[in-house]
Amino acid sequence: MAGFAVYTSQYGPVRVDWNDGAVTGLRIVTQADNAADGPGEPTELTDLAFHELERYFAGDLRQFTVPIAFTYGTPFQQAVWRALLQIPYGETRTYAQIAEAVGRPKAVRAVGSANNRNPILFIVPCHRVIGANGNLVGYAYGVEMKRALLQLEQRVAQGTAHVSSRV
C-alpha cells in the first residue's frame, strides 16, 4: 500500500508520502499543489513523520526515527542519499566529501544533482552539504532556509539554547 498526507506547518503545507510502512517522500508543497492533490489520508506513520519534523524545527529532535525508503533514483543517487544520512547533526560536509564517501571522487557535480533530487527533505539532510569554499549553495527552499537550518542545528548541538523560532 502507498499514500500520502498533507499537514499544516509553520512553513506551509508539508506532504509526507509513504509506501509499505516507510516514508518515501517529504517536502513542503505550494498551496496550489496542495489544493490540486487534496489532503491525502493521514496514517500513524505520516503522523509520526510530521511530529518528528515539528520537533526537529523546534530544536527538540536531532535524529529522526521514522522509517524511510528510497523507492526511486539511480543506484548512484541512492548512494548519495545514504551518505547524507551519515552527516552528523550540526555538522556539514562538502560536495567533494560526499563524492569521496560514495567512491566517486570526481563526481562532485553528480553529487550536487543527486542532492537536488533528494526525495525526503529534512530527514535526509541535504541542507548539510555546502560548497568547497564553505558557501551555502543550492537548496530547494532557498539559501536562507538552508542557513537557518544549519544555524538551528549548530545552536542545539552546542547546547546554547532551546530554539523554537521560525526558520
Image: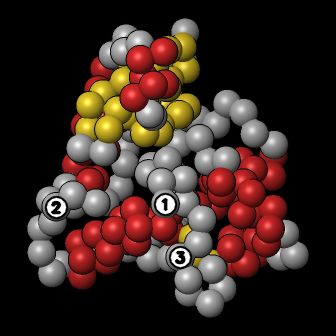
Q: Amino acid at mark 3?
A: Leu
Q: Amino acid at mark 2?
A: Ser
Q: Position of residue 39 (x, y in %)?
A: 37, 15
How packed mark 1 is, by other alpha carbons closer than 10 Å (few <14, some 14-19, many 20 or more), is few
Q: Amino acid at mark 1?
A: Gly
Q: Quadrant of the C terminus?
A: bottom left
First in sequence, mark 2 or 1: give its number: 1
Element class at badge 3: loop
Is 30 situated above or below 125?
above
Q: Residue at x 41, y 17 (%)?
A: 35
Count numbered badges in the picture. 3
Measure the alpha-carbon separation of dots 2 and 1. Answer: 18 Å
Q: Position of residue 74 (x, y in %)?
A: 81, 43
Q: Residue at x 72, y 33 (%)?
A: 72
Is 8 situated above or below 107?
above
Q: Which residue is mark 1?
A: 142
Quadrant of residue 157 in the image? bottom left
Q: Which residue is mark 2?
A: 165
Between residues 49 and 144, which one lies in front from this camera angle? 144
Q: Which residue is mark 3?
A: 136
Q: Position of residue 166 (x, y in %)?
A: 21, 58
First in sequence, mark 3 or 2: give its number: 3
How packed mark 3 is, by other alpha carbons closer than 10 Å (few <14, some 14-19, many 20 or more), is some
Q: Residue lying furthest bottom in this view?
A: 133
Measure the alpha-carbon separation of dots 3 and 2. Answer: 21 Å
Q: Nearer the viewer, mark 2 or mark 1?
A: 1
Q: Which mark is residue 161?
A: none
Q: Which coloring applies here?
A: secondary structure
In the picture provided, is 142 more to the left or to the right than 89?
A: right
